Amino acid sequence: MNIILLGPPGAGKGTQAQRLVERFGMRQLSTGDMLRAAVKAGTPVGLKAKAVMEAGELVSDEIVSALISDELAAMGSDVGAIFDGYPRTEAQAVSLEAILDSHGRKLDHVIELDVDEDALVERITGRFTCASCGKGYHDRFERPEKEGVCDKCGSTEFKRRPDDNEETVRTRMAEYRAKTAPILPFYEKNGIVSRVDGMADMDAVTAAIEAILNR
């Protein structure tokens, strides 16, 4: 099984990808992570990428395609792939089809976690964590039992991520739409796009994704 999992930051894509990894033994292929690993390992593709990045240039589609091809070759044919952050353009989508074909694979599903922008803004901007133990809270959905005191460790220090603000979240949403808009029609014509309510409970989202994969 080879799938593309789409969703804006905060939609829960990372959580769902990890659950698929645990449930089905799939491999999450994040181009960013693969790039860093290849550079660190000094592979031929990694050395190419390092030279490009040190020159302050963007890594080419050719290099990213080579990374994915190398990873698929190393995985073995019985392990499914979850593509994260790639493809982002129609040209990359065409390239991915060729890569998969060369490894005797095909793309089975493109699953988008559909979110309501205003609700997502509320979800993200309300997040905060205990500065001591890292337990997560939310202004509306999960406040400490005793105001100002962490339920888990009793600390009175809390923190918020500086980028968890409305302007940043809406900018991320706009970037996500701009990046995914070009590839969805490409896959819709092949009838492999499904949408799941990303605002639902995490377990419900997982169940909906699994239902799609088990069709």
Image: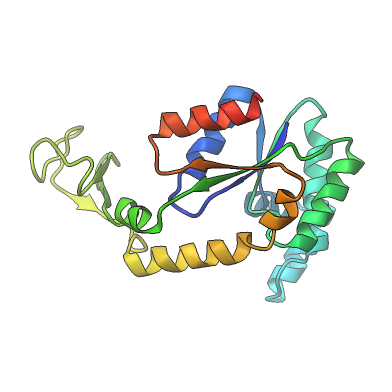
Which residue is at the far left? 146
Q: Which corner quadrant holds the C terminus? A: top right
Residue 174, horizontal then vertical, whole percent: 50, 67
Q: Is 115 above or below relative to 166?
A: above
Q: Residue at x 52, y 45 (%)?
A: 113
**Direction from residue 147 to residue 169 in the image, left or right:** right
Residue nearest the viewer, comparing 161 with 193? 193
Residue 204 in percent (x, y) is at 43, 30
Residue 47 visible in the shown view: no
* Rendering quarter of residue 59: bottom right
Question: How many marks do you count on the picture?
Answer: 0
Q: Is residue 170 left or right of residue 45?
A: left
Residue 80 visible from this viewpoint: yes
Residue at 78%, 51% in the rendered image? 67
Question: Which residue is more in the foreground, 118 or 143?
Answer: 118
User: Image quarter for residue 110?
Assistant: top right
Against 122, residue 102 (above or below) is above
Residue 147 horizontal side relative to residue 88, left or right: left
Indicate the quadrant where residue 117 lies: bottom left
